Image: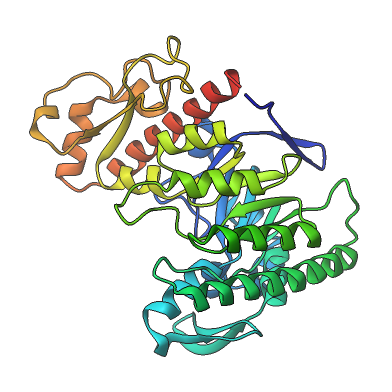
Amino acid sequence: MRSSKNVVIKDRRLSLPAFFPDATRGVIRSLDSQDLVKAKVEGLVVNTYHLLSHPGGHLLKKFGGIKPFMNWDGWIISDSGGFQVLSMVFKNKKLGQISRKGVTFYLDTFNRQKPYLLTPEKSIQTQFRIGADIMICLDFFTPPEADDDLVQRSVDTTIEWAKRCKQEFLKQLENHGYDKDNRPLLFGVIQGGTDYKQRERCAKELIKIGFDGFGLGGWPIDETGQMDYEMLKVDAQLMPDDKIKYGLGIGNPEAVVRSVKMGFDLFDCVLPTRDARHQRLYKFKRSLDKVNLFDQPDNFEFIQVKKDVYKSVFGPIDEECDCYTCQNYTLAYLHHLFKIKDALAWRLATIHNLRIYTKMIENVKQNL
């Protein structure tokens, strides 16, 4: 088993591996920053495309970045926005177009739609306004159904945009007066779909450019709807071991554990928070005091709290969970809250699911 890594910026240390939930628009729905701290969440992922729309890069700059804006003192990763924009354009060509310059789309800013060209340079500039600790290069997302020509185009464009992102990143570091000890980090993203030769080509070129870490690009789900572990394994091997390996979008609990074993360090996903809002709660099959998750990565089960069987369960979701929800409320009460569609249901369920994930990461770190 590999040894753990650390990220240090401005004397702040992040021990890896780590899981960051998606706070796409600068919020985990229904939670405030103290809820996140108490659930032992260390960092969040925000989205450049969505924050460009609301509240806008200029406003974030006035506030000093997303952290003071949302009263969050933890780590922030800013996704480039490329996945959202490109997937939108692929679904409907009328919504935008892709060129070597960047992606042109209609930006909805305060109820006014206007064409906007998201270039690699503008993506990096916006991420500096966001004030992220880790920034992601704008990349050309390879759609699952891409033919050979489109796969090659996505890799060629990803490499070209990565070079431009790196150049703009270095320029912004100088403009902001950062030094090597307090600067943010920049990650490149490996594209190429299921064409592993193209993924290898992409990785080699990104390594030549030089980044602090590398991300898994593309769609990590195979045609059967299962996690494509072969793709994950290929990318983990392509990424340098002395750099941070980021499993973008990997959030299934079992997949996180298995991916750490492959060498990945960072993960993010909407899954635990979205599932909470859809009444799907997580718990461990066996106590973590008795389980090494590397030996039993499927040690997770799910409770559909809307089912009537839970309306009279006067115990917590998980007897051994130390989260605010399990320490103060019963399954019966959560069932009731969801039945009457009260907003408190989202908050309590989300707090619990996130604590299950942070407990999962604690177990993984202990057993590296």
In the image: residue 49, left or right of residue 310: right
Q: Nearer the viewer, residue 141 or 181?
A: 141
Residue 26, image x, y percentages: 53, 57
In the image: residue 252, left or right of residue 241: left
In the image: residue 29, left or right of residue 15: left
Q: Which of 191 and 330 is in front in this view?
A: 191
- Outermost residue toward the left in this view: 308
Q: Is residue 315 above or below residue 110?
A: above
At 56% from the left and 52% from the top, the residue drawn is 45
At 65% from the left and 54% from the top, the residue drawn is 68
Q: In this view, does 219 lie above or below 319?
A: below
In the image: residue 310, left or right of residue 151: left
At 36% from the left and 27% from the top, the residue drawn is 298
Q: Which of 136 and 368 is in front in this view?
A: 368
Q: Can residue 21 be seen in this view?
A: no
Q: Report the quarter where the C terminus lies.
A: top right
Residue 313, image x, y percentages: 16, 22
Number of dots carrying numbers = 0
